[in-house]
Image (cartoon, helix red, strand yellow):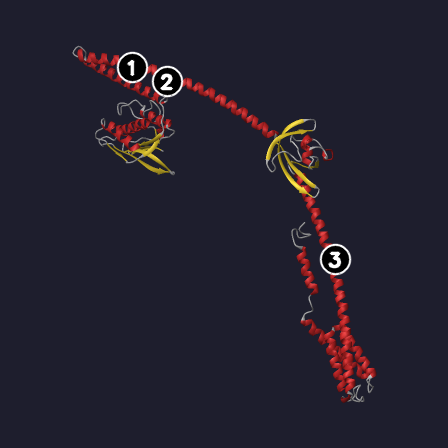
């Protein structure tokens, strides 16, 4: 399209430029060339006259020169003609003085010279004016012809532009993936594209003039009763009264024939079906989640009840075993052999260990039901309290606490976490070297991370996944006594506060527990 005409250009500007180019006067260089040509023609006329008019009166040669002067004016213009007239008058004046010239025997007469100058000059001016008039009319006719040609060309280009614009508009409308319809102010269809034919089942010829309300559910009062330039959902009715969901986008347009309304219609039946399926699936998932949650809650309650019952029912027998074993050891010591005393001591120790495990199991079970209160807490103060509790069992240990540490969490749970971590760090110290424990904070990945670092025996990271499981131990009870619940309680307490904990350790170099 752009190859034939300039879309959006200004043909009037180009026309004015051409007009100015046609009507501007001749340049001075052309005037000089014409003057030189006029002088040359005059000289040639004089030279040609000499052989034909030797020793004649001014009549015949004067007529010849006058014709030559008029020819100069006609061919080259007024100014070259006046220059030619001046040269010829000069020649007539000095001709009688030139031997062998056509005016050699003509008596010198000043009146004749003046008359010749007047005749030549006047005729030059008159012929020049006539020539200028003719040229002006010719130029005007030429300009009018060119203007007519330009107007015809511009009109042709405008027609091509209009035709191509109409072709492009039809191409856009027909190739749209949406149904496009146009209605007049009364709601009668005046445009119906190919996709509208496919969507509603009516051909363009059949749809023309039909009310748009038969195709889409829209109220009409001098136009559609809905907001313009907004996407709205409605119902469509295809041929055969098949209803389906549509999305409308209506735009008003002022045309020379009056106001029309453009309807852009999209079939959203598949989208609606997908949304309904998703809603059904969500409802089903919510129901299933609720059922599973109820099941898990019931199982947890059963497990917690079972744990409480087991721990409560086992405490009395264990206490009885420990009490009877100690009674025998104290009151019947002389009557029991050395091997018997050793067996009774082991029995009492195992019963005590079993009692501690029952207590830890009960504590672990209660963590799931304990109410969690997340609030700003002073970690340094909680850590100081935990340190005092742990140093009772490990007086040789050193526990350093970074001051003014604060976080969001549950104070009771964090107290349990720090007691367990400090106790664990002091317990697994290297032989002959007092435990040194540090509690502080670092920045890692743009967030604060709290850590407990010790100089203990460490462990192989290949076994790190076992560390936080109940009853899991990396060392024997004879080396490091315990029940295997301490770090399990740490992990569960931090998880209840929506946190996480990890460990990094190297054998013989210590261990670091971290939590954001």
Residue under label 2: 304
- From the top left corner, tell me how far across and down residue 352 is, in percent: 26, 17
Residue under label 1: 315
Q: Quadrant of residue 490?
A: top left
Query: Separation of disc 3 and disc 2 at Cα?
Result: 103 Å
User: Can residue 238 be seen from the camera position used here?
Assistant: yes
Q: Is residue 61 above or below residue 436?
A: below
Looking at the rendered structure, the secondary structure element under dot 1 is helix
Local packing at callout 1 (Cα closer than 10 Å; few below 14, some 14-19, many 20+) is some
Mark before the other along the chain sequence, 2 or 1: 2
Mark before the other along the chain sequence, 1 or 3: 3
Residue under label 3: 148
Local packing at callout 3 (Cα closer than 10 Å; few below 14, some 14-19, many 20+) is few
Q: Is residue 387 above or below residue 29?
A: above
Q: Residue at x 67, y 26 (%)?
A: 242
Q: Is residue 489 left or right of residue 221?
A: left
Looking at the rendered structure, the secondary structure element under dot 2 is helix
Label pair 1/3, CB-CB below 8 angstroms = no
Mark before the other along the chain sequence, 3 or 2: 3
Mark nearest the camera among 3 and 2 is 3
Mark nearest the camera among 2 and 1 is 2
- From the top left corner, tell me how far across and down residue 244 is, in percent: 64, 28
């Amino acid at each position: 399209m752009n190859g034939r005409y300039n879309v959006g250009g200004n043909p009037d500007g180009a026309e004015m430029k051409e007009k100015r180019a046609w009507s501007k006067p001749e340049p001075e260089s052309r005037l000089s060339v014409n003057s030189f040509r006029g002088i040359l023609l005059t000289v040639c006329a004089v030279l040609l006259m000499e052989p034909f008019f030797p020793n004649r009166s001014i009549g015949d040669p004067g007529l010849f020169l006058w014709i030559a002067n008029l020819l100069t004016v006609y061919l080259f213009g007024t100014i070259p003609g006046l220059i030619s007239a001046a040269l010829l008058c000069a020649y007539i004046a000095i001709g009688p003085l030139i031997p062998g010239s056509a005016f050699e025997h003509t008596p010198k007469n000043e009146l004749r010279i003046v008359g010749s100058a007047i005749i030549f000059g006047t005729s030059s001016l008159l012929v020049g004016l006539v020539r200028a008039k003719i040229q002006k009319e010719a130029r005007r006719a030429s300009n009018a012809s060119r203007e007519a040609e330009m107007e015809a060309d511009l009109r042709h280009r405008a027609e091509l532009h209009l035709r191509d614009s109409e072709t492009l508009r039809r191409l856009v409308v027909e190739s749209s993936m949406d149904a496009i319809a146009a209605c007049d102010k009364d709601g009668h269809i005046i445009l119906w594209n190919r996709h509208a034919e496919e969507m509603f089942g009516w051909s363009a010829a059949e749809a023309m003039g039909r009310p748009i309300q038969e195709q889409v559910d829209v109220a009409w009062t001098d136009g559609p009763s809905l907001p313009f330039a907004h996407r709205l959902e409605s119902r469509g009715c295809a041929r055969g009264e098949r209803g389906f969901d549509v999305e409308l986008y209506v735009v008003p347009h002022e045309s020379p024939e009056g106001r029309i309304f453009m309807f852009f219609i999209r079939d959203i039946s598949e989208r609606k079906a997908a949304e309904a399926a998703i809603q059904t699936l969500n409802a089903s998932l919510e129901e299933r989640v609720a059922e599973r949650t109820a099941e898990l809650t019931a199982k947890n309650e059963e497990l917690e009840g079972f744990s409480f019952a087991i721990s409560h029912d086992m405490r009395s027998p264990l206490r009885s075993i420990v009490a009877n074993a100690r009674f025998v050891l104290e009151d019947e010591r002389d009557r029991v052999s050395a091997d018997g005393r050793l067996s009774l001591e082991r029995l009492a120790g195992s019963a005590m260990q079993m009692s501690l495990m029952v207590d830890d199991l009960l504590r672990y079970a209660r963590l799931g039901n304990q109410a969690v209160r997340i609030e700003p807490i002073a970690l340094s103060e909680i850590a100081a309290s935990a340190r005092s509790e742990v140093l009772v069992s490990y007086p040789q240990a050193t526990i350093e606490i970074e001051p003014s540490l604060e976080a969001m969490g549950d104070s009771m749970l964090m107290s349990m976490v720090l007691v367990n971590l400090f106790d664990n760090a002091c317990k697994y110290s290297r032989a002959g070297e007092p435990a040194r424990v540090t509690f502080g904070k670092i920045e890692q990945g743009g967030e604060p991370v709290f850590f407990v670092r010790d100089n203990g025996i460490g462990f192989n990271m290949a076994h790190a996944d076992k560390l936080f499981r109940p009853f899991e131990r990396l060392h024997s009870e004879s080396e490091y006594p315990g029940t295997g619940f301490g770090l399990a309680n740490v992990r569960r307490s931090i998880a209840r506060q929506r946190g996480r904990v990890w460990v990094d350790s190297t054998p013989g170099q210590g261990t670091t527990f971290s939590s954001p």
